[in-house]
Image (spheres, rainbow, N blue to C red):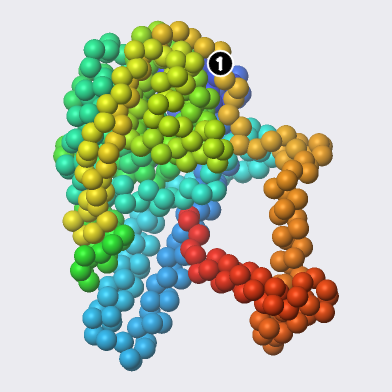
Amino acid sequence: MTVDATIESLFACPRCDKGLTSPAQTGLHCSACQLDFPSLDGVPVLVADPITTLGEWRQRHHMLLEKLGREQQRLDGELGDRSLSEPARRRLKLLADAKAEHIVELKTLLRPLELTGYQANYETYLALRTRVPSDHGLTTYYPNVHRDWCWGDDENRRSAELVSGALHGIDDGPRLLLGAGAGRLAYDLACGETSIRTIALDFNPMLLLVAAAVSRGGTVTLTEFPIAPKRLQDFAVTRELHAPSRAPDNLQLVMADALRAPFRPQVFSAVITPWLIDVIPESFDQFATRVNQLLPKSGRWVIFGSLAFGQPRPRDQLAFEEVESVLAAAGFANVNFDEAEIPYMCSPASRHGRREQVVIIRADKAKSVKKPPRAISLPDWIVKGDAPVPLSEPFQMQAASTRIHAFLMSLIDGKRSLRDMAAVVEQQQLMSAAEAESAIRSFLIKMYEDSQRETTY
């Protein structure tokens, strides 16, 4: 999947916003920044610091393989228990074998991620305020891969119908999907309008590598681990992922950050954000101004999915009725709201599937608004290190908690009981023995539960 000259003209450098070139077809290049952008299996990597970003994803890849290896070893260990029932033994053996096979599958799929010869510059990474979100791993949306390219036909078809309907009446200029995931919606839209350029953007390399492989007509073998297996054999199911047919030439995948979309201004007739605005780490009003920059006058923004805004500030957790006023302030008009019920994540091997009430919002750009500031993920006092660290209320609370936790941790020596620890706390006149025992129990419960949780890679 190469970038042709027509699509190349849409791109801009995510660092300086200048246009990109591809000298001698060696890949995309920014002459202003003197920066070459690599690709993953033909997918251009257009992030502000591609070397460090790919390095971080490689690290998460290796940690994921380590995690799967530990899980396999744990399962093998449990299989040594002679008291296991026969069904339990079959289930654990199925999972142990599946974990081992899954390691091989991921190594094969993510082989393009093992780039060599790069020297990561972490200081540049920080200075550019770009980070891979700490809560987003390679497999964060792993079930969606199987939905897109194996068993989700009803959901995929209905989603494409709803989004296509919302695009009716606009011109045939290029269209952009921000947060395209494993790419099925982008693929379906591209197949439905083969004369229209369709750009699918996501920053997760695993999702993009699956999309790239199946879009070319290939097959990807991956094990599904259903959330709520129906039967014993459903705890791990080998799936063959493939597209109905090879993708048309009008589909282009891009690895990039939706908050730093690497495109020239006003080049898309439509921007589609499927299941994105509720999870993106930015307020909706700020993000709306970013979408405005990508559209010409009368260009259309189509919002599809959930409106359950997962923002930390209550003011940013918008109600349905607030969205229209935010869109108007961001330069949009002719706002149309619709709702529909569709199947959602209905794996044939899982009881977890359900019906989902989705929203479809279309809004046309009426005017340009002031360009928003470049998205940053870290403040100056962290990046530059020459300003005072703010003594905020959350930091003060965390500092107090940390001191107490450090003291309690110092009491854990493999000999003292919970009540012994409470007696020491009372001797230090920090609280009564009864209060201390309750507080220490709560602390140890949290420590224990945290130790049982798996980290996402």
The residue furthest bottom is 82
Is 383 in front, or is 42? 383
x, y percentage for residue 110? 40, 50
Q: Is residue 292 above or below residue 224?
A: above
Please name the residue shown 36% across and 9% down the image: 298
Specify few, some or many for label 1: CA neighbours under 10 Å numbering under 14, 14-19, or 20 or more. Answer: few
Q: Is residue 339 visible?
A: yes
Is 15 in front, or is 159? 159
Is 61 in front, or is 382? 382
x, y percentage for residue 442? 61, 70
Q: Is residue 220 above or below residue 45?
A: below
Please tell me how many numbered marks the rendered image carries: 1
Please name the residue shown 51% across and 39% down the image: 311
x, y percentage for residue 282? 53, 33
x, y percentage for residue 75? 38, 76
Is 444 in front, or is 221? 444
Question: Is residue 241 rendered to the left or right of residue 455?
Answer: left
Q: Is residue 259 above or below residue 341?
A: above
Kindly state the secondary structure of the residue where label 1 is placed: loop
Kind of residue indicated by mark 1: Lys
Please name the residue shown 72% across and 40% down the image: 382
Q: Is residue 137 above or below residue 10?
A: below
Question: Is residue 449 rendered to the left or right of residue 92?
Answer: right
**Where is residue 409, by image quadrant?**
bottom right
Question: Is residue 449 rendered to the left or right of residue 154?
Answer: right
Mark 1, residue position: 371
The quadrant of the rendering that contains the N terminus is: top left
Please name the residue shown 25% across and 79% down the image: 90
Question: Is residue 158 rendered to the left or right of residue 409?
Answer: left
Q: Is residue 216 visible?
A: no
